[in-house]
Image: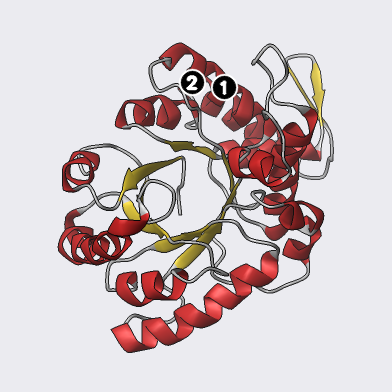
Amino acid sequence: MNLRSMLFVPADSERKLQNALQSTADALILDLEDSVVTTRKTFAREFAAQFIEVSAANCVAKLYVRINPLDGSLALSDLAAVVVPGLAGVMLPKITSAADVQRLGYYLDALEERAGIAQGTVRIVPVATETPAAMISMGSFTALTMPRLAGMTWGAEDLSTAIGAISNRDADGGQLSPVYELAGAMCLCAASAAGVPAIDTLYSDFRDPEGLAAACALSRRRGFKGRIAIHPDQVNIINSAFTPSATERERAQRVLDAFAAHPESGTVSLNGVMLDIPHLKQAQQTLGLNV
């Protein structure tokens, strides 16, 4: 499942949901958590369910729902409402470990059966770094079986609040402080270990397309496969950044051809540069081949 761009949309806003249908996002995240006030939670989950049932069949984007935290009082009501035909996945916030993902999977087993949905259809993308407990239990993603896991993303805002930080950025407001840089790196490594794509966190200034493009280029170089969007104007920039260019694909094909010409060799030379098996695997990934 391609998850270059995942666009957040408040689930209680019909206007924003209809506008989001015109975007080129790979996934829409109908948000029941932070963007919906408490008094509108019930309306939001009911409206999200209706939107999925009506829109999923003709929507290019996969439809996800970010539910409220699993350990709170709202999550089961969220799930009971939104697990309907057409739901592609659930984004799970504020986890404490991979056990939360596994537990959500058990709930989905029952709810899919009730809704007449094939078992395993609804996938899960956890927000993996929003609590201190999650940070120190990231290794749990290599210890549990989670067939519904579709990707992992991370966030710095809730984590900084949880640990009592004044800000998650350095004094000049530029770079993320080390603990939050670590959070992104741990998400990246945990996703790789679990065999799913890592989705980078949001870029908050939606009026800064140049900054977003630069941030996406950096995160792709680091290994992320996509990024969260908070405004439709961000989607095309994100999609472009996480799609290999024609030049990249041409070079990757030359790498594959070089190795194909020397099938008994673990190293080859291309334009005077020595390449080995990791370069071959990178080229295969660029071309979307299974490695």
Q: Name the amino acid type tagged 2.
A: Leu
Name the side, left or right, on which 38 lies relative to 164. Answer: left
Would you say 19 lies left or right of 11 here?
left
Q: Residue at x 68, y 30 (%)?
A: 168
Residue at (40%, 24%) from the top-left corner? 237
Looking at the rendered structure, the number of numbered marks drawn on it comes to 2
**What SS does tag 1 mark?**
helix
Task: Decide which of 239, 40 is in the foreground and name it.
Answer: 40
Residue 189, given in percent of the width and then of the height, sits at 75, 47
Residue position marked by numbered label 1 in the rendering: 215
Mark 2, secondary structure of its residue: helix
Task: Residue 23 in the image: state x and y as whole percent.
Answer: 26, 37
Q: Which residue is mark 2?
A: 212
Dots 2, 1 in contact, CB < 8 A = yes
- Cα distance between the residues tagged 2 and 1: 5 Å
* Neighbourhood count class around disc 2 (C-alpha, 10 Å): few under 14, some 14–19, many 20 upward: many
